[in-house]
Image: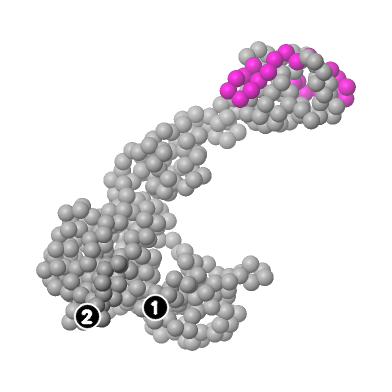
Amino acid sequence: MSLISVEEALARVLASANRIDAETISINDAYGRTLAENVQAKRTQPPFHSSAMDGYAVRGEDVQQKGNALNIIGESAAGHGFDQPIGTMQAVRIFTGAPVPEGADTILLQENATRIDDQVVVDIPEVKGRHIRKIGLDFSEGNVLLAEGHRLNERSLALAAAMGHGTLSVYRKPKVAILATGDELVLPGEHASQDQIVASNHLTVAALVNLAGGEAIQLGIAGDSFLALERGILAAEAEGADVLVTLGGASVGDHDLVQNALTRRGMELSFWRIAMRPGKPLIHGKLGPMAILGLPGNPVSSYVCARLFLMPLIRAMQGDPDAGRDLSEPAVLGCAVRPNDKRQDYLRASLTIDSDGLPIATPYELQDSSMIRVCAEAGALVLRNPNAPAQNAGEKCRIIRL
């Protein structure tokens, strides 16, 4: 199977995404979840004409002259309105957010007036109609204000609450089983022999799963044997995983058994090599309803592939219409770069800002995909297209912020 482009690989991954079932949850638990249906306002906001300031509710024509004295006939506070109409040369003491009494059309600011016993005297005339929030200023009952596929942030969560919703229909979090592979790996905190290294990719991938709105399920480490890999695959199926992510063993070496193990189990292979660096040996397929992503074992390759393919897959499963959108943005190079070959490159780079506010991305000299420290320090990935020519410092480029 020949190398395919990053764009083609992402298109196939997104096309394979099964839509997750919906569930109804309390709005208290809905932050970060993705709406499974449009959300319609159950009420009008504000539901009445309300005061935008502290002062006095009056008729506009009564406060056009300095020195006019109006009789105060009551008070309107938030949650406790004044239920009688006001007439000529009458005023109601009013506070921010309180209902405007019938007959009033203007708020005389308290700092523009003087209260003397049960009267208020106009010190500075007020423009008729000022400082009143009209009924429905924000939204009206029946308005669709949040769309299916929207991921709830702190602002849209407040909007849903204001619309009158105590529960919301959201997509279930996709279950993503993570299986690290390789005899050379031990879990963090365990003793590593001279020939072993500490596993870290599973933590990176789990963090990205959570960031994309999924639920990470750690399956531990499978050794380099078909029996161990089969046990891991069976464990993912038993967990009801929507996605199985394997880490390592995706290449063609004698100990790279993952693809064969998955094929034996019945995986339908979509692709397994991409024209990109880092991350060429990436497996994608379906095993029944479960999506498969076999990420490379090198830490940077695993991380970049998880960002480019796993996170969009999780978002697509939750109905996000922008799951595959381009996340890159313009920047300038902080140093010269060599010509690129036929693979799309993602260079780890430091990130600073120039005097005009434009990002300056400076690729690190060493780009080995095993270097976790460089990846941890990087502020961005510099995108270089296949066969891109050499570029000098100061020339334009595209980056993905990390």
Judged by depth in the image, the label closer to the viewer, 2 or 1, is: 1
User: Residue 46 vs residue 346: left or right?
Assistant: right
Query: Dot 1: what SS?
Result: loop
Q: State the image coordinates of residue 279 (x, y, percent, origin top left).
A: 34, 75
Whichever of callouts 2 and 1 sits on the residue coming sooner in the sequence is: 2
Q: State the image coordinates of residue 230 (x, y, percent, origin top left).
A: 14, 65
Q: Residue at x 36, y 56 (%)?
A: 210
Alpha-carbon span between mark 2 and mark 1: 22 Å
Q: Quadrant of the N terminus?
A: bottom left
The dot on residue 371 is 1
Crowd rating for badge 1 (residues with CA inside 10 Å; few <14, some 14–19, many 20+)? some
Q: Residue at x 80, y 15 (%)?
A: 117
Q: Which segment is the magenta one?
A: 58-82
Q: Residue at x 39, y 65 (%)?
A: 307
Identify the image quadrant of residue 211.
bottom left
* Residue identified by numbered label 2: 252
Taking the magenta stretch, the answer to whether it contains residue 79 is yes
Whether residue 390 is visible here, answered yes or no, is: yes
